[in-house]
Image (cartoon, helix red, strand yellow):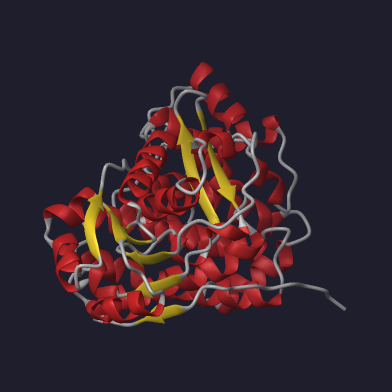
């Protein structure tokens, strides 16, 4: 008999046009003075201003100085703005980078310290911050329903996840209409992040029945609708299904944590500039192949692949490769800017983040180097 624990404290309000409900939600939290933490693109396209206009003057300040892989400086600057304005709630509008930055800023603003102290584990996250309403504009990270934030400390040269019960948003407002403005490359990368979340949650060591259900549903939707959302950006049904897939994958990996493909993504992003979702997808098919050929989850992954309509696990991995090709994602070490030799050794060494231990097949440096070497443009041979 299996024992498990599942928790999801974030209310999820999902549907096209739901952004118009924001003033009502702010009233539920008795918010008096708010801050909008947003992406520069949301400021440029006028959506940020629309939110200020409909907030009934509860939100008058916008902070948008956040880069695609948020740094502790971004977070500290945001926290300083929260303190300066005396904000008692925040609305975070954007992709995963914005939501991740906002979660930690809402907490750090209530302390006299830097977020670097918490990322390095020098200080514990032991108190709530101001409440945050999370409004995602991409279908990818599911940061709106998780308790984790991924930040980069440029001084210490580290990119790592930081998690706490106090990082859960107070409310998730998921409006698929907000994803209609996603550029194709963002749609592709964030959609592949959804696949990584769902597949890693399914085979990760911490999986359990509730996360298995969510992971399978999310993966099924992503295989059906990602390419359609990529090729038909104005297709609201495809956008809505990818939003659903993203949130559902979040309900899975928030409990299981991510695994090997995410561990490998950190140095690819930090040292070689590969966008997060694309970096996760770089090794995702390789780990699906490996974990379905050996180790304790092999037969389970084969059965999962067949339930999703594939001949076997190899066919599922091959489908991810084909999707990546069709959407112009990197396929080889060379395309990622990784030269063999020192670059490859550095990549291998940097890939052993704690979530590598969540992979069902134990990874060594030799085993990982072999896996990476197969992704060299000179030797790689993708099967169907």
- Compared to residue 372, the image places residue 199 above or below, namely below
Across and down, in percent, residue 158 comes to: 52, 30
247 or 313, which lies in front? 247
Q: Residue at x 36, y 69 (%)?
A: 31
Residue 242 as seen in the image, left or right of residue 281? left
Q: Residue lying farthest right?
A: 1
Q: Is residue 37 left or right of residue 154?
A: left
Residue ID at (32%, 82%): 15
Q: How many marks?
A: 0
Quick one: 157 or 86, which is closer to the camera?
86
Q: Nearer the viewer, residue 144 or 58?
A: 58
Q: Give 339 or 159, whichever is nearer the viewer.
A: 159
> Image point 50% across, 51% down: which residue?
107
Q: Is residue 67 above or below residue 317?
A: above
Q: Position of residue 296 (x, y in %)?
A: 78, 59
- Which quadrant of the figure has residue 175? bottom left
Relative vertical location of residue 155 with respect to residue 359 in this rendering, above or below: above
Q: Quadrant of residue 21?
A: bottom left
Residue 172 as seen in the image, left or right of residue 162: left
Which quarter of the rendering shows the N terminus? bottom right
Residue at horizontal 40 percent and vertical 48 percent from the top: 278
Left/right placement of residue 355 relative to residue 223 reads right
Would you say residue 312 is visible in this rendering?
no
Q: Position of residue 67 (x, y in %)?
A: 31, 40
């Amino acid at each position: 008999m299996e024992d498990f624990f599942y928790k999801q404290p974030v209310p999820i309000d999902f549907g096209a046009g739901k952004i118009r409900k924001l003033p009502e939600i702010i009233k539920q939290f008795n918010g008096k003075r708010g801050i909008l933490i947003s992406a520069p693109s949301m400021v440029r396209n006028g959506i940020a201003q629309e939110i200020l206009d409909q907030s009934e003057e509860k939100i008058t300040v916008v902070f948008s100085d956040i880069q695609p892989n948020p740094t502790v400086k971004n977070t500290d600057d945001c926290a300083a703005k929260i303190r300066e304005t005396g904000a008692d709630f925040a609305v975070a509008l954007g992709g995963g980078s914005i939501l991740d930055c906002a979660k930690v800023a809402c907490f750090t603003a209530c302390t006299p310290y830097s977020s670097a102290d918490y990322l390095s584990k020098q200080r514990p996250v032991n108190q709530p911050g101001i409440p945050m309403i999370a409004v995602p504009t991409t279908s990818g990270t599911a940061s709106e329903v998780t308790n984790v934030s991924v930040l980069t400390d440029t001084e210490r040269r580290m990119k790592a996840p930081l998690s706490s019960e106090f990082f859960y948003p107070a409310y998730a407002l998921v409006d698929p209409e907000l994803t209609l403005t996603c550029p194709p490359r963002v749609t592709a990368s964030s959609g592949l992040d959804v696949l990584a979340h769902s597949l890693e949650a399914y085979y990760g060591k911490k999986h359990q029945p509730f996360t298995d259900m969510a992971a399978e549903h999310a993966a099924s939707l992503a295989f059906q609708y990602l390419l359609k959302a990529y090729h038909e950006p104005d297709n609201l049904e495809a956008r809505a299904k990818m939003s659903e897939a993203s949130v559902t994958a979040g309900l899975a990996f928030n409990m299981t944590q991510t695994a090997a493909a995410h561990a490998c993504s950190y140095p690819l992003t930090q040292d070689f500039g590969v966008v997060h979702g694309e970096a996760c997808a770089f090794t995702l098919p390789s780990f699906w192949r490996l974990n379905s050929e050996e180790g304790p989850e092999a037969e389970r992954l084969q059965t999962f692949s067949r339930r999703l309509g594939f001949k076997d696990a190899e066919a599922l991995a091959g489908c991810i490769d084909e999707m990546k090709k069709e959407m112009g994602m990197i396929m080889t070490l060379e395309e990622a800017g990784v030269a063999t030799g020192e670059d490859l050794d550095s990549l291998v060494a940097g890939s052993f983040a704690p979530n590598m231990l969540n992979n069902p097949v134990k990874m060594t440096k030799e085993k990982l180097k072999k896996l990476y070497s197969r992704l060299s443009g000179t030797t790689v041979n993708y099967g169907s």
